[in-house]
Amino acid sequence: MRQHKLALCKHHFLEWVCDQTERNINKYKMFTKGDRVLVAVSGGKDSLALWDALNKLGYTTGGVYINLGISGDDQYSLKSQSLAEKFASDHNLVLHIVNIKSDYGKTIPEFSETNKRGKSKPCSVCGLLKRHTMNEIGSRKGYDVLVTGHNLDDEVSVLFNNVLGWQVDFLRRQSPLIPAKEGLIPKAKPFCRFYERETAAYAILANIEYIEDECPFSEGSTTIQNKELLNHLEHQRAGTKLAFYLKFLRAKKELFADLEDDKYTEALFSCPTCGQPTPKQGNCAFCRMVTRS
Ligand code: SF4
Ligand code: ZN
């Protein structure tokens, strides 16, 4: 690990990832051993590695897997679901499964075809469905926090994009922990300081079977383009990505210090159809999308 000037054997690397995960959880006050933690599982390396590390660290965890109905040449959703199920059963852990087609009537590609919001943009529909569903499962099943496997490369790619467009609202919200709000359970990213190659190495060394294919809709995405560019910078100067992220978190405290209490603490309304919080009166964006399609 050039950025840390550190080289470890298999045994010590696995231990190091778990130790650093615990450090991040404590540093950003994400949750404690007394909390019930819901892990958003995609069947990929990051989410399964995170679930494995949290389990080894002794946290009480369950998983949630959302079958998006995405097939492609490699049956993406079917394959990823079976790997998520295998991990859960091998470790004797609870996995909540949601199937978009049977629960809401359509797959992500179908929603994307018929919905204005998703026209040629399946990721926008997909993001909305995932956010809604995970919060709904987390609240209904009594979890204290939702965790996702976002790694440093994911965070830095989003940060880079938000800086390019000076998306002040997004910059303000980007954080290792998004605290709870009425009706919304907190969301945390315990892997936010690990490089993608570190989470991949952990998954391989811990013998975790994960889906290696990317979702077919991610092809050519801005996130992937940003990652390539940032990898180039990292290659020239080790530690660039980590420094960019950590310095942003530090700068953010000053940049947004006087704005802490305005619109993110505004009262939310309750959706009359699903009961979940929504920023405006009337049906939430999720219910509007499902009923209009
Ligand atoms: Fe959903 Fe887009 Fe991610 Fe595929 S790439 S899982 S469609 S958000
Ligand atoms: Zn609703």
Image (cartoon, rainbow, N blue to C red):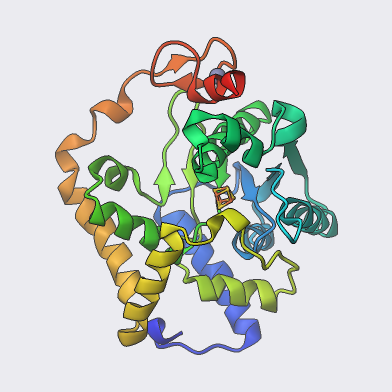
The answer to whether any part of residue 239 appears in the image is no
In the depicted structure, whether residue 77 falls above or below residue 24:
above
Residue in the image at 81% along x and 55% along y: 82
Q: In which quarter of the image is residue 244?
A: bottom left
Please name the residue shown 45% across and 33% down the image. Answer: 180
Along the viewing direction, whichever of 134 and 62 lies nearer the viewer: 134
Q: Which residue does the image show at 56% across and 42% down from the upper left?
A: 146
- Asked if one can make out residue 237 in the rendered structure from this viewpoint, the answer is yes
Residue 117 or residue 40, whichever sits in front: 117
Q: Quadrant of the C terminus?
A: top right
Q: In this view, does 265 lie to the left or right of 179?
A: left
Residue 158, percent from left and from top: 37, 56
Picture layout, residue 235 above or below residue 203: below
Q: Quadrant of ligand 2?
A: top right
Q: In which quarter of the image is residue 106?
A: top right
**Residue 35 percent location from the top left of the image:** 59, 42
Q: Tell whether 124 sits left or right of 222.
A: right
* Rendered residue at 16%/50% (across/down): 254
**Image spot of residue 289 (x, y percent):** 55, 24
How many numbered circles does the render carry? 0
Q: Where is residue 17 in the image (x, y as percent from the top left)?
A: 55, 71
Residue 255, above or below 221: above
Instruction: Please say if 213 is above or below 291.
Output: below
